[in-house]
Structures are given as C-alpha cells and as structure tokens.
Image (cartoon, grey):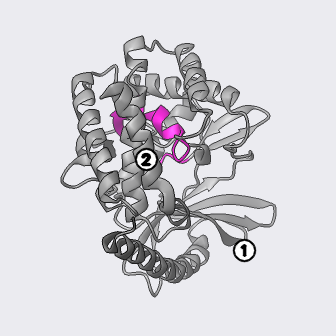
Amino acid sequence: MVTGHSTTGKQDTEKKMTDSEKSMGVLLGHLENLANQSLSLWEVPDDASARLINVSENATYLVEGSHWKSILRIHRENYHSHRAIECELEWSKALTSEGRVITPDFYTGRNGDPIQSGVVEGLPSPRYMVMFHFVEGQQPDEGQDLVRPFEELGQIAAITHLHSIQWHRPEPFERLVWNLDTVFGARPTWGNWRDGPNVTPEIRKVLEQVENTVTARLTDFGAAPGRYGLIHADMRLANLLIDGTGTRLIDFDDCGLGWYLYDFAASISFMEDSAQVPALKESWVRGYRRIRALPEEDVREIDTFIMLRRLALLAWIGSHIEAPEPRELAPHFARVSAELGSAYLAGHG
C-alpha cells in the first residue's frame, strides 16, 4: 500500500533532485569559465582549452592544445585544504618514484606550486586546482570479465599498503580518515546515510541493524597497524585505467587513513549486487596474497567492509545529489542497500 507519507517523500526527493540539477548546471558553467581562464597558470599551449569529462567529488577537465593533453582537476569547495592536497600528491609521487605503483604525474604551475587557486564571478570562494599528466588507457566496464583485472588490482592494493606501512609521511600530514566515526559519527564526512534518497522507514530499520552489526564487528576487528593505515580509499572502476602494460591507479583525492580491506570494498562501489562480486573478491585476495600476507580471519570480514562502504555511498548520494552520477543512482540505491544488508545480517548478524 502506498501511504501519503511515502508519496510526499518521493515528491520531495524528486523536487530536491530537480532543483539540485538546475543548481549544478549553473555551477558547471562557472567552473568551466574558471578552468579555461586558469590555464595560463601553467605552461600550456596558447590554443589549449578545457572540456568537462567528469563531475563527482570534483570537476575534471580534459585540456587539449597543439600536441598537448592533460587533466585538470578543480577541487570541491571546502573538501581539502592546501596541505591535504600536498600530502596526496607527495604519496602518489612517492609510490611512482620508488617503483611501487605507476600513478599519474602532475605539473607545477608557473609560480612553482603544483596546487593553484582561482575564482571567477559566480563562485563564492576560490577553488584549488591540480593539473595531471594525461594517461592513456581504458576504464574497465562492469559488464566485462573483471576477474583478471581484479587479481592485478589486489596486487596493486597490497603494494600500496606495504608502502603505506614503510613510508615516512611528511609532517604535518593531513588527509581524510575513513573509520566508524567519519562514516557513522556525529559529523560524518559524506553526511548521514539516513538522509539518502528513498530511505523509507522499512529500509531504515534494516540499515540500522546493519550499522549496529558493522560497528560491533569492526570494533572487535580493531585498528592494529597491520590492518589499518594510509589507503587509496577509492579503487573503483572509475579510477582504474587499463592499457597494454597493465592496470594503472589514478585519482588519490580520497586517500587517507582507514582499514586496508576498505580498499576492496571501494573497488566494487556501486556494483555490490553484481553476480561477479564473489569471483572478484576471490581474485582480489589471490592477487593480494602474492604480495602481502592476508589472514583468513581478515578475509572473512571483507563483507563487513563492503557494507560500511555501501552505507557511506548512500550518504554520499544524498549529499551530492546535484551531480549526474548520484542522481542516476538515487532511485534504487537505498532499496538495493537494504537487500544487501539483509543478506549480510543473515550471515553476520
């Protein structure tokens, strides 16, 4: 039966999405102006121009000119400080320079700083910007056979985790934290999942149980140095590029302190209900163990990290509903999350 409450909630959600879509269109117009007006901050060809290719946490542009390509990232307002972005770039560069993982290099601006700042009329405050080298490759598609790429991804994850343990972090070190408090606490990084679109009372009841179970299990799991450290935190398909030489890891924008197994959960973001997931988990673990030991008791907790990430993504969709990807995911994400949650509780509750 459809109640008045649920109908009103659906209408409110649809209106919020429509209003947000209009606001996003205006914002993207300002950001495009900023992108093109800021190109002179770097040494790029005079005929170079920027074209939007993705908007998610940040706005990403392809910059093209005479025999020139690069990627320009305009950071989301008030998400990272200048120092936090410096720490991201330093870890990414260290991984490549030490021969661990190949990551995209970045350009230094004319003023000697890889992090530039700019503002245009219509934006309330300046935005940070970073220009990266263009990397050839294809983004994996959920519809293809991902078993082999995920085995390599498991190896890449293990390599980054070993580097995380051994690397002497620059001081002061400032990055995001991905733990129970920043996902479920009073001031969660991406917001409260309860505010996500289409979280009905029935769905909320299931997901409350999931949150309680995840919290209890990860509290018992603990954050010992072998389980918790600096992670990429967003190794999903959108942040992988595959070419003839293998799989490359890009976009360290969400890197921070968290559980190492969170990197697998992030790798299947938005496809947790895919029939491939059990095989992908097995493949990822196999690849990981070629580089670093992974106890079976840790592997048994991977499903808990998947649900932690899923609830974080539900919150992310609610707090980023103005962007195209969250709007596309919004109609069914809460319902599928509850279905996944019910299956999880049956095995882990």
Pick the residue in front: 269 or 9: 9
Question: Which numbered dot is residue 46?
Answer: 1
Image location (x, y in percent) of residue 257: 33, 37
Residue 112 visible to the viewer: no
Pick the residue in front: 190 or 225: 190
Amino acid at circle 2: Ser
Q: Residues within 10 Å of mark 2 (few under 14, many from 20)?
A: many
Looking at the rendering, which quadrant does residue 109 occupy? bottom right
Residue 346 visible to the viewer: yes
Q: Are marks 1 and 2 in contact (CB under 8 Å)?
A: no
Horizontal placement of 132 versus 84: left or right?
right
Q: Residue at x 60, y 54 (%)?
A: 132
Q: Residue at x 67, y 58 (%)?
A: 70
Q: Which residue is mark 2?
A: 337
Q: Residue at x 44, y 43 (%)?
A: 339
Question: Which numbered dot is residue 182?
Answer: none
Amino acid at circle 1: Asp
Pick the residue in front: 29 or 82: 29
Can you say whether 302 is above or below 82 in the image? Answer: above
Image location (x, y in percent) of residue 51: 67, 70
Quick one: label 1 or label 2, which is nearer the N terminus? 1
Q: Residues within 10 Å of mark 1 (few under 14, many from 20)?
A: few
Can you say whether 72 is above or below 210 in the image? Answer: below
Magenta span of residues: 251-271
